[in-house]
Image (tube, helix red, strand yellow):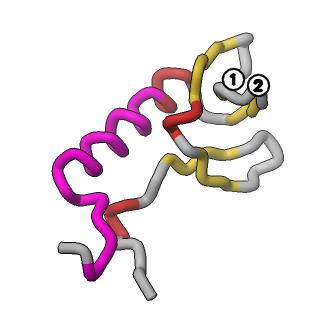
Amino acid sequence: MMKVVEDAEMVWLTRFDGTRFVLNADLIECAEATPDTVLTLTNGHHYVVREEVDEVAQLVVDFRRRIHTGLGMLEGQA
């Protein structure tokens, strides 16, 4: 069984009720401050999160950087 390397976490976000979830960053179409942060996905779903738009953008950039530098690999694939 493959285990995800700890540095390979995806984009973790927080709903307004405090629950944490992982979002597939490839599906984010739009991020708006209304003033709450609303993420619209390519499939039409919307998520309202505690993180600000700039923070979401930085999380996505950091995730992509880890993937492109090889830090997002699964154990056993190196």
Magenta stretch bounds = 57-76
- Where is residue 67 shown, x and y percent of the image? 28, 50
Q: Answer above or below: position of 60 versus 73.
A: above
Q: Of circles 2 and 1, which is in front?
A: 2
User: Which residue shows up at 50% across the image and 36% down it?
Assistant: 26
Choose top left, top right, bottom left or bottom right for residue 59.
top left
Q: Is residue 66 left or right of residue 27?
A: left
Callout 2 touching callout 1 (CB < 8 Å) = yes
The residue under label 1 is which amino acid type?
A: Thr
User: Which residue shows up at 42% across the image and 36% down it?
Assistant: 60
Q: Quadrant of the N terminus?
A: bottom left
Q: Which residue is mark 2?
A: 44
Mark 2–mark 1 Cα distance, whole angstroms, equals 6 Å
Regarding mark 1 in the picture, which secondary structure is present there? strand
User: Which residue shows up at 18% across the image and 73% down it?
Assistant: 78
The residue under label 2 is which amino acid type?
A: Gly
User: Which residue shows up at 75% across the image and 55% down it?
Assistant: 19
Q: Is residue 56 left or right of residue 65?
A: right
User: What is the residue that sits farthest to the bottom in this orientation?
Assistant: 1
- Where is residue 61 shown, x and y percent of the image? 34, 34
68 magenta-colored: yes
Q: Which residue is mark 1?
A: 40
Q: Answer above or below: position of 25 versus 54.
A: below
Q: Out of 14 and 70, give the one closest to the viewer.
A: 70
Choose top left, top right, bottom left or bottom right for residue 29.
top right
53 magenta-colored: no
Q: Out of 22 and 77, give the one closest to the viewer.
A: 77
